[in-house]
Each structure stands twice: as structure tokens, then as C-alpha cells.
Image (cartoon, rainbow, N blue to C red):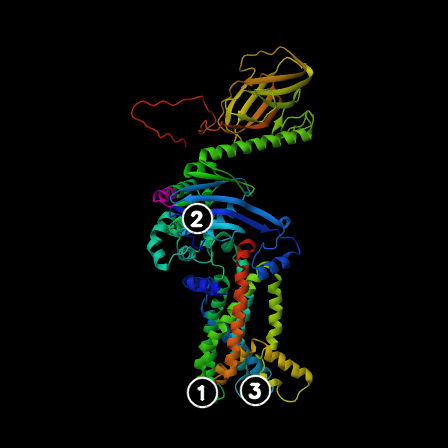
Amino acid sequence: MFRVARQLFRFRGLLGTLTARELKARYRGSVLGFLWSLANPLLLLAVYSFVFGVLFRPARSQGIGDGPYALFIVSGLFPWVWLSTSALEGSMSLIANSGLIRKAVFPAELLPMVVVLSNLVHLLLAMPVVLSAVLATSLLTHTVGGPAVVMLPLVLLLHLPMIAGLALGASALTVHFKDVRDLLANLFTLLFFLTPILYSLDFFSGGQSRMMQLMGWVVRLNPFTPFTRAYQDVLFFGRAPEGLLWAQMALVSLVFWSVGAWIFDRLRETLVEAA
Amino acid sequence: MTDPAPETRPDDAIRVEGLEKLYRRTLPGDRLRTLKSVLVEGSLTGNLRREDAIEALTGIDFTVARGEAFGVIGGNGSGKSTLLKLIAGMLKPTAGRITVSGRVAAMIELGAGFHPEISGRENVFINGAVLGLSKREIGRRYDEIVEFSGLGNFMEEPVKNYSSGMYVRLGFAVAIHTDPDVLLVDEVLAVGDEAFAHRCIRRIEEFLAAGRTLLLVSHSLDLVSGLCDRVLWLENGKQRLIESPRRAIDAYRQEVAEKEAEEHQAAKDQRGDTTAPVAMSATSATSATADRWGSREAEITAVRLRNAAGAEHYHLQSGEDATFEIEVKTAAALTDFVFGIAIATPRGIEVWGTNTDLEGYVPASFTGAATVRLTCPALRLAAGEYTVDVAVHARDGAPYDYHRRALSFTVTERLGAGGGVGVYSPERRWGFTGDVRWTDEKA
């Protein structure tokens, strides 16, 4: 797992170039080009605001406070998109570039990393949209946001190794089992609802049925939950995540990176033959 | 390739010791076992039974000196490309050791790293970075690369609009300008147009003149003999021999020719002995294929090639006696007939041809079955493959039975007897007067 990190560091220049290439290639041939990275989150936010602000207004459920529900959703949703897209696209990254791996001497770990980083750029480009919406709402109603937003880079930085580990491990496993991608796609659909994105974790507190209590524990043990809560804290609530949350994030990130990089490293020599 | 090897002598560029490479057979339902073996034992082939493995390479030992051009030849599936990938560090040996000193560039598939959507210019920078150059280094060489590729007007164009030749030209230009100490080339010089191929070869010659090392894998034996100092012949993953190019290539050609002759023979035996090496269609006055036509008033029933000893043989040494034998039969008595034979190369270049009419035989009569023999003592064809057309026709040319490519045979030149190009290999000797000297060493 150290080898993967070393390789990534050694080829950091190439990693940057390839990420830039990926972003450029993505928008080549479209009229709006990079503006789509701003327009997409803006449109998504508009849709959510319309649906949950105008069409049907959900009961003020527990723990969301008085801020706009749509804003609560997107502050957890955009990072989730980074995570799930990186894992799914990342899992196919080696197969999609098999020519590069089989026919050229190429540090394969760059490929899933490029996916992770280019999707991080998309998340970062969505942030101004979220932050402006938070700022505007806070100026009008004082219900959301706060100075703790400066901790956002720290949360992103903690989240990165986790997503990278996931993409690395998934990419190497997918070379041998194409099933991984379908498994992941379905797993992520399920996990989306088991992660407190559309609701707050407080939803499960209080006297409820055994089933709901059980679900509450599942959601709490979901490794993606601490990150989602941290994003909601710094973006939506504007408060610093508590110490336990930081510890959870650090632990989850360490475990995911270590396992992912270990799997990748172990499978490394098989990639040239099997990709 | 990264592990340090203190015992490597400084003038060895590549050192391969006891190299073995096994591939795991991918049997259906075996994937989980593969994965388990890799994750638990950290080895693809650790617990592998021999019958589950494909021996891509075994017992490979050689060193390539700095500044040497080393060729690798062998049939398809002989392990050439695997060897190259192992030396490039893309694959890990199952057993044995490979040490390479200096910066390595591998040309396996040119332009493999190109991204179709972005411009040639950007791809040069990315491809260069993949090959280990910094942005600044590529920037310094950029003009040279463009100049060499001859694609000056297309550099801002996305490479998906490039022709395959342009793709390869740019790929070669980038790879050769990475300034490697050791260049590994796998069959890539065959692509691109002739002029560019020559330019590539000239560039590689300059590269060698600068004391760099080349390992060339190729099916183009002429290219190998033109560029290389020594040649390794791989056969089914085993090291057959390492020799000077001429000896290695002659030995290789000879064996290929002998194998082909055996195959001819085997195919013939299978069909029964009455037909010629190339299958003849059933008797039918109307039958006409692209390779055989005529009224069939007379019919060729067999065509053979015999060597000096009279044995049927489809592989000759240049200068050996050769007898072409045609069996012909006719239903009715003929008074107007000509027998003809012509030798051509597979590409259709006529080497030589004649017939009984041209040689002054005036037909009187021909009935029943006959055997026509044309013996050429000391047939001095150059090494290569040849086909034979045979015919029986009327003196005005009206064909009774005209059979194109009725048989094929191969010719090799005796080991050490030299080579040359073309189709004719005369008996010869060199003479030198004046101050011309040669080393004793025979290439």
C-alpha cells in the first residue's frame, strides 16, 4: 500500500496532466464546456428546491432545522455523487484503458486516481453554487451556514483517501470480475438510502419500533455516514463537526485506503495480463 | 528491473538469468481460485500445477552489452513479446532475474497512450510524461518531435482525426525522443509508410551509433539482420540459439522451410498419393477455377518435385538438382500438344518459364498416360518461396489443362554460403586487388 502511494507521488505531475486531460476531453465538443460543471449542480439544486420547496413540503423532520430542505439534501448529495461516481467509474478505469496497461509501460494506479480527482474537481466546481445558496439563505433567514465552513477542505482531505482506496480496490478487482461493477452499482443504490442524505440521523432517535431502532444502527455503522454528517455540519449547519466524527472519518479513511491499496498492489502484476 | 544488481557488469545493458514465465490458464470457474492465490499468497502462479500453466518462457539466459543491437526472432507464440514485456518491467518473472541498467523505453504499440479527443500537441506531452519525461524536457524536445513526425500542420487537431499512419508516426517520434538508454521495440517498424519506416530505421541507427542499446523483436528477418549484432531465436518459449544474425536467420529459415515441406508431405499423404501437393479438382471438362482452366482434352493428373536423389521433396538447397514431374493423360490421341512449366514467386513475379514448343520439340502424337520430366541440374534460385505453374496446351495456346500454382516449394541457401536478394543466386566468388582488408571474423 505504500508502493501505491509512492507511485502516485512519483507520477504526480502526470496525474495532474491526465486529470486535466480527462476534464478537457469531457467537455470537448460541447458548447457550454466547463460551464456545465456549474450548471449541473445549479440545475439540480433548482429541481430539488422546486420539488421540496414548492411541490410538496415535507414535515419539518427531526434534526434538519429551519433551513431549506433542498439545501440540506445537496450538502450531503454532492459529496455522495463524488463518492459513488468515483467508485463506479473508477472500477472500470483499468478495463477502459486496457490498451495503455497492456501495450505501454504505465503506472496503472494513476487511472482510478484520475477518475477520483476529476470527480473531485466537479465537486469543487459545485461548491460555489452550494456556498452562494447557503450565503444567500443565511443573509435572508439566518437559519443556515456559519464560519465552520472553513473546515470544508479538511473534510474533503479526509474523505479523499477513502474514495481513492475504494476506487483502487474496485478497479483491480473488476479486471478479474466484471461483476464488481454491477455489485457496486446496486450496493450504492442501497447505501444511498442507508446514508443520512435525505434525512438526518436524529430521525432515528426517540422511542420507535424495534425495526426503526435497528435501521438507526445500520445507518450509524455505515462507513459513509460520518462524512455525510461532517459535510452537512460544515456546509448546512455551519458548525464544527464534533471530535468523535473526526476520529470516525480518519479511521474509516485509513481502513479504506489501506485495504484498497493493498488489494491493488497484490493484483498489480495480474493487471497487464488480464486487463 | 528496478532491483539493484551489484554484480551486473557496467557494460551489460540487459541481463537475463534463468528466466521463466508461466501464465495461468484461464479456465472457466477458475477465477476465484486465481484471485485467492494472488491475494493470499501474493503470487499468480504460486500454487499452480504444471498442467494449469502455460509456459510462456523457460530457461532464458542472455546478456546484451551496452551499445549492442540484439534481435529476437521466432514464430508466433514463441514468447517474443512476453520477453519484451518482462524486460520492460510490465510483467513479473515467475522465476529468474532481469536487470536492466539505464532509462528504458518500450515501443510495444505506438500511440497506445494517446487520448482520441485531445490534440496531438497535448498528447505529445502526456505520452512523454508516461514515458518518464518532465514537462520541461518535453517542451525542449517538442519541435524536434513534431519535425520528426512530419505532422506540423496537424498538431492542434484531435488525434481521433489522425490516420493510423499518423498515429504511429507521432508515437514513434515521442518514444525515440525520450532519449532512452535501452530501447525495446516490438514489431512497430512495420507500420507507417516506407519513407517513414526508413526514417525510423535511420534514427535507430543513429541511436545505436551513440552507444545506446536496442532490443528488437520482429518477424522482418531482413530488418533484424540489417540492424542487429546478435540474434536470439525463441521457439515455444525456449532459447533455441543465440548467434550472429546471418547464422541465426539462416538456421531459422531453413527450419521453417523444412517444416513447411513436412506439412506439404503430410497433407499429401492424407489425401492419398495420386494427387499433386495442391489439390486438383475432379475430372470434368467444364470445370474451371481461377487457378485451373482448359478443355481437358489432355489432363494433368499429378505434379511433383523431386530432388537429386529422386525423392519427392518440396524443399531444396540452392544449387541442388531439381526435377519437375508432370503426369498427363489423354482420352483421345493428340497430335497438337505442348507441355509447359513456369516458376514464379508467391507475389506473381515470373522467375522463369519454358515449354516444349519454345525448346524446339515438334509434336507428333500423344496417347494414353505419360510422365513429363524437366530436370534442372544445379537450380540456382535464391532463398525464398516459389510456385510452379504447369500446362498442357495446343501450339496456338488453346489450353487443354492449365494449372496455376500446381505446387510450391522453398529454397534455402546453405549455411554460411551467403545470401543476397532477388530470385537468382549464381555461383560466385569475390576477388579483391589493391589495399582492401577484412577482419578474420566471419559475420
Please check the rendered image and state whether residue B207 is part of the magenta-colored stretch, yes or no.
yes
Q: Residue furthest left?
A: B435
Dominant secondary structure (helix, strand or loop) of the stretch shown in magenta: helix
Measured in 3D between alpha carbons, the distance from the residue under mark 1 to the one under mark 2, in whole angstroms, is 58 Å
Q: CA distance from mark 2 to mark 3?
A: 62 Å
Q: Could you tell me residue A261's position as x and y percent? A: 52, 65
Tag 3 residue: A63
Residue type, label 2: Met
Closer to us: mark 3 or mark 1? 3
Which span is picked out in magenta?
A: B203-212
Label 3: few (<14), some (14–19) or many (≥20) C-alpha neighbours in 10 Å: few
Residue at 45%, 68% (x, y): give it.
A34
Q: Which residue is mark 2?
A: B166
Asked if B199 appears above or below A50 in the picture, the reply is: above
Task: Give above or below for B77 relative to A108.
Answer: above
Classify mark 2: helix, strand or loop: helix
